[in-house]
Image (spheres, helix red, strand yellow):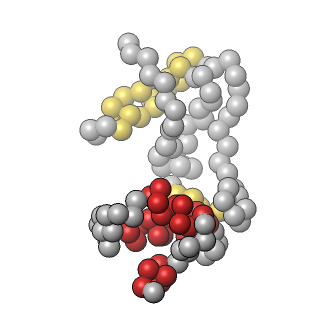
Amino acid sequence: MHLVCMLKLALQKFPQRIVFLQLFHLVSISKRGDVIPAVEEVIEKGKILSPFKIIKICPSCNHELFIEGAHLFCMNDECPKRLLGTLQYFVSRGQMDIESLGDKTLEFLFDKGFIKYINEFMV
């Protein structure tokens, strides 16, 4: 048996097949595909009880989140994280491929108010 400390956990097929995990649970996992581990069962319950809660409000702009299948979406067109994500996608390798404009630089420019929308790249 191998011990693994999972710092982040993606809940696949949520909310239909959500596994209610809590901090410090001992779980059995199996390998799915090439990399993705799947939680099979809870072997031993943790001592600290804090159930996973699905957030209903966007942590960035405080607007209500929309659930579509296994994903949560903020529908606010002016949500800062949504705007930044759109910019990061625009400059990424598969799109405009702007090599000298990485996530950290783009985040800095966005936070300082130098760029907010894609059309501002065209000025």
Left or right: 65, with 92 as reference point: right
| Residue 20, quarter of the rendered image | top right
Up-down: is 91 above or below 60?
A: below
- Measured as percent of width and height from the top left, residue 26 is found at 53, 20
- Measured as percent of width and height from the top left, residue 121 is found at 44, 80
Quarter in which the C terminus is drawn: bottom left
In the image, 75 versus 78, the foreground residue is 78
The residue lying at 67 percent from left, 43 percent from top is: 53
- Measured as percent of width and height from the top left, residue 77 is found at 61, 75
The residue lying at 63 percent from left, 20 percent from top is: 46
Quarter in which the N terminus is drawn: top left
- Measured as percent of width and height from the top left, residue 64 is found at 70, 64
Up-down: is 110 above or below 41?
A: below
Up-down: is 80 above or below 104?
A: below
Q: Residue furthest top?
A: 1
The residue lying at 59 percent from left, 32 percent from top is: 21
Residue 73 visible in image: no
Q: Residue furthest bottom?
A: 123
The residue lying at 46 percent from left, 31 percent from top is: 39
Number of marks in the rendered image: 0
Residue 88 visible in image: yes
